[in-house]
Amino acid sequence: MKRKAWCGSADHPVSRRGFLGAAAAGTAFAADMTVLDALKQPALAEELKWQQKRVILLWLAGGASQLETWDPKPGVETGGPFRTIQTTVPGLHISELLPQQSERMQQTAVIRSLNTKIADHGGGYRLMETGRLPEPGVAFPHLGAILARELGRIDSHVPDHVSMYTSTEGRRKGTAGFLGARYNPMFLTENMMPENIRRLEAISEADHQDRAALRDFFAERFSRTVDSAAVASHGTAYERVRGLMASDRLFDISEEPQAMRDKYGPTQFGEQCLIARRLVEAGVPFVKVARAWWDSHGQNFETHRELCADLDHCMSALMDDLADRGLLENTLVITLGEFGRTPRINGSLGRDHFARAWSCTLTGCGIKGGAVYGKTDDKGETVVDGEIGAADLFATIFAAVGIDYEKEYMLGSRPIPIADFGATPVEEVLA
Amino acid sequence: MSRTCLWGLLLTLTLLPARSGAAGLPAVESLADQIDQAVHTRLEAAGVQPAGPLDDERFLRRLMLDLAGRVPTLAEREAFLSDESPDKRTAWVEQLVASPDFAMHLRNELDLQLLARLKTDNDWREYLLEATRANRGWDDLFREIMLPERLREGEQGPAAFLRERVRDLDDLTNDTAVLFFGVNIGCAKCHDHPLVSDWEQRHYYGMASFFQRTYRTKTGLLAERFDGRIKFKTVVGDELEASFMFLDGAATYEPPVELSDERRKELDELVRKAQREDDAEPPRPEFSPRAELVRMALAPTGPDYFSRNMVNRTWARLMGQGLVEPLDQMHSENPPSHPELLDALAKDFATSGYDLKRLIHAMVLSETYARDSRITGGAEPPAADLFAVAIPRPLTPRQLSLSLLVATANPETMPGTASGDEWEKKRDELENRANSFATRVEIPGENFQVSVDEALLFSNGDRVAGDYLRDAGDRLVRHLTSLEADDDVAIVATQVVLSRSPAPEEQSRIADYLSARSDRRVEAIQQVVWALMTSPEFRFNH
């Protein structure tokens, strides 16, 4: 691995350094250097910036009910009190709790046949974030890290994996696992601005820059004497600091016109969706916005009345905004959680964890809008048609944004396909 | 055989002086020679000229990071450089492995190896420190960590390794195999290993069998159930019962126990109580699967995975990569880079009573350890597994955190090892102060990358500015401010932070930086110290 970092020419320290930067991100993998090299060509990079695929994951933490969202069953004992509404897609009905979405279903594909089997929060989360079952001793990367690696630019000046939480389950941060810390999320905790992205007031802008240049002077003198991808990654990380600091504006929604802020609304989820749009517009390949807490063991219907209103409004504002800016065709918006909820309504008017027959949606990039895939039985208890698992969903997501879902990472001598072995994309929802 | 008898025996073995097998061992210097000879033989065959030896100042930095877990203080540096005796390196190594810093650093390394970041557990860290201070054998630690309820009854410390994993049998199984035996059999859970014929499903479930009866009591200690066997399905659908089988294929059989249904129910109830109630004493079965694991691992019928793993991990820690790489892939299809050397070191390690200090001592005395990391000329660098050039190693979170504290302190407050007891107290205090920053730093592993989070933290974190770079009496910044000439600031700052004197162009670059900011000298000095401590030269051991 260390050998790969060497280009063999000490006569061209600049180009070697560039190569080291690229290699640092690709070490130990069957790195596709051709792509990395291509991204380094300014003209090509500029073009790619506009064609670049991005993904926004709206994470419904705690597990939203498929019956109160994308797969309603009105009139049966498990159906609950809400009615359905006709959408803009002939024959497709969704819950009346999502009226704005019903007017936009021609842009969205619904998958109603997830059977992921694992119905505890931790296990479900790990499965739906990595697309595979955990394995002792292997730290699988989360969806965001894979997409950051596959869709991001090695020398990107913006973050390439941003994760925003709201509460409880949404606090789970996500990890790059064996892909390495380069792809860890920039995680927003209590406030809406990432940590350490702004200069401290005690140092002036000019000194901050000059200090960095002094650092580079020492770093360069040291780095050129050693042959090490790890040392090169140190340089890459510091090279990105100035760019990331400049991206602090992306998180500042006060820069948006009031009319735009009104469209997203004043909720935290709405504001985070607006930040997500600002980020993808600037080229951030993956943003996760978590909305909690859907875990409605009691009072399922009240919970969903409130949370669905927020989801419906914010997701619709996001889709419209992306479409208006010409970004939706290159941005995939996913709604997903760790599982769905039981058709059976319990004694507290709640629905419990349920992973056997539930739903998610895909909108935008690479997706055939209006498609409905899979079918559950009349009561919603089992999948009767088109059953898929987490790995298939991951393959579908990868295929939608143009990533070869059979691509493999090498972990030592072991090949690990980015979508688990046996995964098949759902062609029916792909454009 | 009575239970007391069995446990009495194990206990006696534990209490035997660790070095009982040490008679007739070669001197540590000749072990170092063996290392160099083995490495040299391969270099010769490959026609590779190794890098020259490190100069004194760089050698001291490397040595201190490896033996003391921190950069040298200015006082230590001056003492070492002014020491004119020809064998000063040997003498310093000897002093350092006997120093309190050594015990603390080895404790930190073992903590990182075994618990990583599952938990920061003070009882566990105290337990390890007590062991490294007394230089207890690695086998002793292994026994106690695997059998805390039998050998360290009632103590929370040694129980931590199992306790933090007991909720998940796969974690217990795999982590034990990886961390103590250098073997990753996770792949063999669902099918025989597709690439490595050594590892079959029965090995995985054999290993799991040693832990399957283990449970956690309400008070956070460990115990074992009276029965239970793992059944597993092969890929062709046969259901098999796992045996208590070690990695080398040796298996142990459980003596049959006749229990009435009534007695069995009673025992089950006692187990349930121990899991639920604070003061319930867990029952102790005579047959302990974990004790069988310990017994078989320490008396292997095949490769001595236990010794080889620790030798390999220690080598990787000091030399930048293992003789077997990756560290958890010890199997017949992934031979070591220097097979005879690994055999010899593992044998010496076992014979010495699993003496970690001796192993480390021998490695750092070798020429192989003391090579330069710098590559000169434009030639293709030699393969890393030739150990022709030293491999730069990222500091561990604690090495980095401690080194920052040492390197940004007023050097007058950091006397170093020479001050004896006073230093031991100081070091203890630094150890505690290093805790919280260490949690912000990535643990080095395969394919290590510095994260941009770290670069942002150093660039803009108020902690970094407010603590390490503070203008206060106990900080380096204040000390530098008291120096009048900019050139002196440049020299002292570089010596303290990077443990070397600046090159002329570095010195003038710093002096220029300062003179351009004579209106804000304190800030300028803070910026210089910052630029030095964020250089990769500080971030790595090289």
Image (tube, coloured by chain):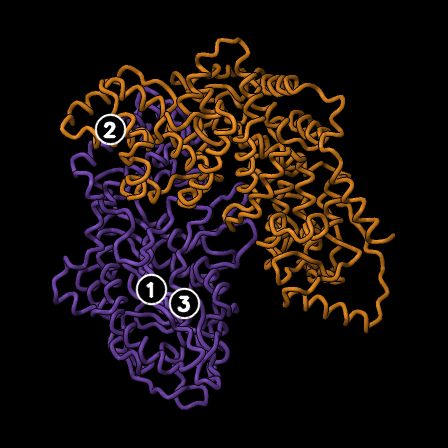
Chain colours: A purple, B orange
Quadrant of the image occupied by residue B530: top left
Identify the element where label 2 is drawn.
Answer: helix
Percent from the top left, x then y, of residue B42? 59, 20
Residue at x-position 19% and y-position 60%: A326
Q: Which residue is mark 2?
A: B525
Q: Which residue is mark 1?
A: A166
Q: Amino acid at mark 3?
A: Gly
Percent from the top left, x then y, of residue B79? 45, 16
Viewer-closest of B296 and A384: B296
Identify the element where label 3 is drawn.
Answer: loop
Other residues around mark 1 within 10 Å, as few (<14) / some (14–19) / many (≥20): some
Q: Residue furthest front?
A: B422
Q: How many marks?
A: 3
Cα distance between the residues tagged 2 and 3? 51 Å
Q: Which residue is mark 3?
A: A337
Residue at x-position 40% and y-position 87%: A80
Viewer-closest of B507 and B237: B507
- Determine the chain carrying the residue at label 3: A
Are discs 1 and 3 less than 8 Å apart at CB?
Answer: no
Viewer-closest of A90 and B441: B441
Question: In what quadrant of the picture does the C terminus of chain B appear?
Answer: top left
- Determine the chain carrying the residue at label 2: B
